Amino acid sequence: MIRFTPRATAIAAAVVLLPTVAGCGYNTIPTKQEAARARWADVQSQYQRRADLIPNLVSTVQGAAIQERTTLTQVTEARARATGVTVTPETLNDPAAFQRYQAAQGELSQALSRLLMVVENYPQLQSNQNFLALQSQLEGTENRIAVARRDYNEAVQSYNTSLRTFPTVIWAKTLQSDAEPMQLFSAAPEAQTAPTVNFDGLNPATPGGTAAATPPGSPPPATAGQ
């Protein structure tokens, strides 16, 4: 009679049960989790690419002797806040931390939109090849950010669903109980309203005028006689 040691018995049981465990979705949660994290890395990469483009963009606009400084300052400060938000692996599971990150990036998007509206009134910039190249790269990056966010949301939705549906919910409640739902990107309220810029007193043919950026939702400036 052949006798098996406890270790050999455990190994044999694992070999027998492995196909059954795999077939019940044991690997589904970690697989979807890693896919979501990979999409998150894509989002961060595109946001970093945008942040890297901004200093050259601001320098080019400043070099055109534009008198409007408020919008440039807003872009610079928004970039500093966006890149200053600490991002850790736990950020994806922390609603407050994720919201801070999203809000900072959204603020930077709005500041850039206002800046690009301002420079439309400066012909010398519209013919500046360096500016046009940076503008094109920035627009391309914004498109890639949108795609990366969409792909991330889709991956997270799939992962989060696996934590609540059968049979994977069994593992989520037992052996994989450390798996937590991830946060989704959502459209910020200000993203639904196009930024406005007050060009009062700015003559497009005279770049010395001043264009004051007005945050979305702010009332228009009062005019004489009102």
Image: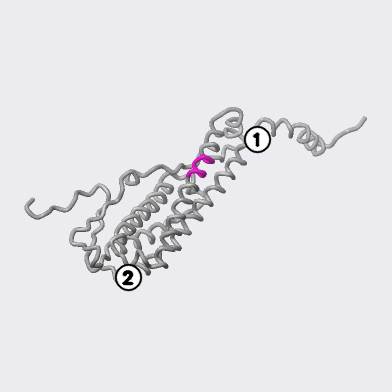
Residue shown at 23%/59% (left/top)? 212
Q: Is residue 224 magenta?
A: no
Part of the protein shown in magenta: 150-156
Residue extending farthest right: 1
Q: Amino acid at mark 1?
A: Tyr
**Which mark, residue 36?**
none
Q: Is residue 192 left or right of residue 164?
A: left
**Residue 97 pos. (x, y %):** 42, 49
**Residue 94 pos. (x, y %):** 45, 45
Closer to the camera in the image, 27 or 194: 194
Q: Is residue 107 left or right of residue 175?
A: left
Q: Amino acid at mark 2?
A: Ala
**Which mark, residue 26?**
1
Rendered image coloring scheme = one colour
**Residue 191 pos. (x, y %):** 35, 46
Q: Is residue 152 magenta?
A: yes
**Residue 111 pos. (x, y %):** 33, 56
**Which mark, residue 64?**
2
